[in-house]
């Protein structure tokens, strides 16, 4: 796609956003420096076509980081639980089964705690 086409597409996306009631913000996208738009509770960059998180204070920065770490961790744990479930399904030895279940409970407990923190 040519640069010119890209720009006009970007502009038409901005126009569409404004028509749909979005508000143009003073802040610019940290990636492409296009103006950002607020759509309901979300801030998006029409050029990157992505949601942008604007961080104002250190406190907020660490909260955003915390949320992203926790949500990654949650994903990892879910994958582990899935793998464990397959092992449990094929395991016949009661001792090994017990061991697998203990690990499963630990994973589920970790997931429960992440949920409690609010991720
Ligand atoms: Zn952008």
Image (tube, rainbow, N blue to C red):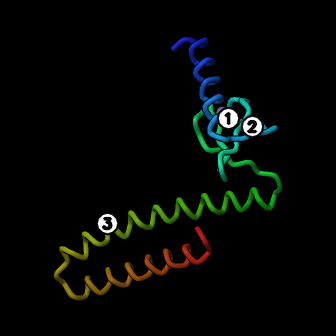
Dot placed on the residue nearer the N-terminal end, 1 or 3: 1
Q: Is residue 67 visible?
A: yes
Element on which disc 3 rests = helix
**Rendered location of residue 55, percent (x, y):** 76, 51
Alpha carbon of mark 3 to alpha carbon of mark 2: how far? Answer: 45 Å
Q: Which residue corresponds to mark 2?
A: 24
Element on which disc 2 rests = strand
Eye-nearest disc, 1 or 3: 1
Q: Within 10 Å of the Cα at label 3, are there few (<14), some (14-19), or many (20+) other Cα atoms?
A: few
**Rendered location of residue 4, percent (x, y):** 61, 11
Alpha carbon of mark 1 to alpha carbon of mark 3: how far? Answer: 46 Å
**Rendered location of residue 102, percent (x, y):** 37, 84
Alpha carbon of mark 1 to alpha carbon of mark 2: how far? Answer: 8 Å
Q: Nearer the viewer, residue 50 or 82?
A: 50
| Contact check, label 1 and label 2, Cβ < 8 Å | yes
Q: Measuring 26% from the left and 82% from the top, which residue is drawn there? A: 96
Q: Within 10 Å of the Cα at label 2, are there few (<14), some (14-19), or many (20+) other Cα atoms?
A: some
Q: Measuring 67% from the left and 57% from the top, which residue is drawn there? A: 65
Dot placed on the residue nearer the N-terminal end, 1 or 2: 1
Look at the numbered disc 3 and say if its residue's Cβ is closer than 8 Å to ligand 1: no
Q: Nearer the viewer, residue 47 or 105?
A: 47
Q: Which mark is residue 83?
A: 3
Q: Is residue 47 visible?
A: no
* Relative height, residue 109 to residue 63 (above, below): below
Q: Nearer the viewer, residue 61 or 45?
A: 45
Q: Quadrant of residue 19?
A: top right
Dot placed on the residue nearer the N-terminal end, 3 or 2: 2
Q: Measuring 61% from the left and 44% from the top, which residue is drawn there? A: 51
Left/right placement of residue 21 relative to residue 82 reads right
Q: Which residue corresponds to mark 1?
A: 18
Left/right placement of residue 39 relative to residue 96 reads right
Look at the numbered disc 1 and say if its residue's Cβ is closer than 8 Å to ligand 1: no
């Amino acid at each position: 796609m040519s640069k010119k086409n890209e720009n006009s597409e970007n502009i038409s996306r901005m126009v569409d956003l404004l028509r749909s009631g979005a508000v143009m913000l003073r802040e610019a996208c940290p990636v492409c420096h296009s103006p950002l738009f607020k759509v309901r509770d979300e801030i998006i960059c029409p050029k990157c076509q992505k949601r942008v998180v604007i961080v104002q204070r250190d406190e907020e920065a660490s909260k955003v980081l915390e949320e992203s770490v926790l949500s990654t961790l949650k994903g990892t744990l879910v994958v582990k639980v899935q793998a464990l479930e397959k092992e449990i399904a094929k395991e016949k030895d009661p001792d090994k089964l017990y061991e697998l279940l203990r690990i499963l409970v630990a994973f589920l407990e970790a997931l429960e705690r992440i949920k409690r923190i609010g991720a």
